Amino acid sequence: MENFLDLSTYHPRENSGSRSTNRLNMQASFAITKIIDMFDLNFTIVMDIIDDVVFLITDETSSKLITYQLKTINSKNNSYTLSKLIKDDVFYKLFDHIEQLNTEIEFIYLITNSPIKHSFKDNTTKKNSEIYVSNLDIPMKDLHEQVCIAIESNMRKNQNFEEHGLSEKFKFSLWDVTVSTHYDLAKSKLTELCTQKFPYMDVKSLTALHQTLYEILIRKQSFEFELEENINDVLPHKSYSSNELKTLIYKATSVGALTMEVIKDDYIKFNNLLEEVKWNKALADLKTKIFQFPELFDKNIQIIEEVIIS
């Protein structure tokens, strides 16, 4: 894996194992949206190791980690409660990143697709109160005082909490999607990026590119490992780099740009019209198969000769 930190001393505390398909799919879509946000950077994305989604961003002199823990629910009629997140030790587990990776990590995000409800007794009015956390990209220490108190109570289970406290590295952000909208939202965001940066990519290529990237991230995410394994041996199976993405986009662009005019101008001089018609049909069949099976973008396209001969 390219430009990765030496994580040989990092020890995963748990292997999340199988989870609902909906949650895994939403994580892949979230990863695509963050890939687009960081497209111009030199990054490696890691799926389901250290956290649900992790980005290593490097330049000529330094590297940094940004981690994302996703908590998603299937229905917008429901909401997360802060008490449930604390019962599940979500914030205590997030603090583990500070304990193991403090010098390498820049931000530690908790992402939810629904506001977090917190119920408490107001010390001033002596009445029960409710607040909803629905901020975008906010340090946790800047949340409502009662929310911070509850988060800190969970983090204090870590014996090193007093040394670091509720660090500015901990952030919260609402990702307003549902189980039925995340896929199209990520596709739309990728389409917008490619329209700006690769205006000659056609619609079919864009669709296949999104599906291919989505499938790659699902595959990376689903790779299983044992906690006893060396993490540096596992990481190549769980990661995908910005250079790999740019290669994938080049292949997608190349497929869309291949036309009979290009073939005639750059590759073949046809002897007669019938021969050109056969090649034109072969090219159309080839593109159809590629768009039906977008993972072909990520492999050597060996189907050309078979299509032409048939």
Image (cartoon, grey):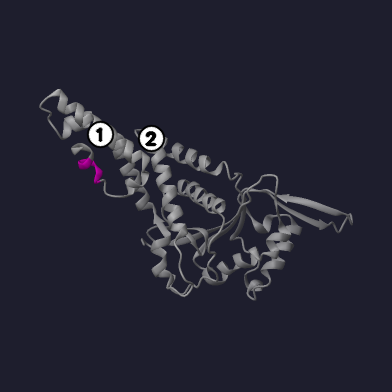
Q: Residue furthest right?
A: 126
Q: In this figure, what is the number of numbered marks?
A: 2
Disc 1 to disc 2, C-alpha distance: 14 Å
The image shows residue 303 at horizontal and vertical percentages of: 25, 43
Going 70% across and 45% down the picture, which residue do you hit?
A: 77
Residue 45 visible here? no
**Circles 1 and 2: CB distance less than 8 Å?**
no
Going 49% across and 66% down the picture, which residue do you hit?
A: 104
Is the N terminus in the top left, top right, bottom left or bottom right quadrant?
A: bottom left
Please indicate whether residue 44 sits to the left or right of residue 268 in the image.
right
Residue 150 vertical placement versus 116 (above, below): below
Residue 238 vertical placement versus 34 (above, below): below
The image shows residue 247 at horizontal and vertical percentages of: 32, 48
Identify the image quadrant of residue 219. Answer: bottom left
Q: Amino acid at mark 2?
A: Lys
What kind of element bears circle 1?
helix
**Front residue (pair 206, 59):** 206
Residue 186 in the magenta stretch? The answer is no
Q: Residue furthest top?
A: 273
Q: Which one is closest to the eye, mark 1 or mark 2? A: 1
Q: Amino acid at mark 1?
A: Leu
Please indicate whether residue 233 sits to the left or right of residue 48 in the image.
left
**Type of secondary structure dominating the magenta stretch:** helix
Label 1 belongs to which residue? 283
Q: Residue furthest left?
A: 271
Going 10% across and 27% down the picture, which residue do you hit?
A: 271
- Write down the region rendered in magenta: 302-306
Tell me the tag on residue 204.
2
The image shows residue 4 at horizontal and vertical percentages of: 40, 64
